[in-house]
Amino acid sequence: MLGYRNRGERANLVNRFRVRAGVRSLDVTAERPLLVLCGGAVGGATTEAELMKRYARDELGFRGTIILDPDSHSTWLNIANAIPHVEDADTIKIVSNAPHAEMGREILWTQRPDLAARLVRGDEHRFGEAPLLKILGALRATQSRLSGAWRTATDPHAAIRQVTAEHVTDQRAIDQRAIDQQATGRSQR
């Protein structure tokens, strides 16, 4: 399950929704149902994974197996860090709000197509549940796709290309300022 930036010491609205969706997505007939909660301390002192675990245990009463990924700070890392825990699973469900879960599934196809072949949809969508959250999530996903952030999140090389392009642009601007300063200095002589 993918976390969301959390500033406080209690799971926020988005993370509570995601935990509920993750718990109800578990196959209760599975031999070893497992809930992998992903998310580092991105917005606060406590990791998203720990906050989601507390919510699952304390407020939902979930007593099944939970594994935490407290180190990831991006969706790409959420998936990468969850892989060792789900490699032997017969089925894999990536749960979040629907657009974010879709991004997670695309990332798994990029990182490990052999595991992605075992993907099944989670139960993150129920008609009428959290409509405002779903609308905002869809808008954010659309913005992410239009800005190219989605591509960066699903393609590790895109991030490197973006940083390189920004560096080249910055260097050109620095070079142009130096040329302008030299020209200004010459014209004042």
Image (spheres, grey):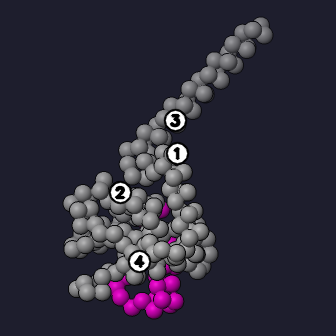
What residue would you read off at disc 4? 22
Disc 3 vs disc 2: Cβ atoms closer than 8 Å? no
Residue 63 included in the magenta stretch of the image: yes
Under mark 1, the amino acid is: Ser
Q: Earlier in the sequence, mark 2 or mark 1?
A: 2
Looking at this view, is 29 or 82 the one in front?
Answer: 29
Quarter of the image that includes the C terminus: top right
Between the C-alphas of marks 3 and 4, the distance is 40 Å
Question: What segment is highlighted magenta in the picture?
Answer: 48-73
Q: Percent x, y for residue 82? A: 34, 68
What residue would you read off at disc 2? 107
Q: Earlier in the sequence, mark 4 or mark 2?
A: 4
Q: Nearer the viewer, mark 4 or mark 2?
A: 4
Q: Residues within 10 Å of mark 3 (few under 14, many from 20)?
A: few
What residue would you read off at disc 3? 167
Q: Is residue 176 above or below residue 39?
A: above
Q: Determine whether the residue tagged by mark 2 lies in a helix, strand or loop.
A: helix
Q: Earlier in the sequence, mark 3 or mark 1?
A: 1
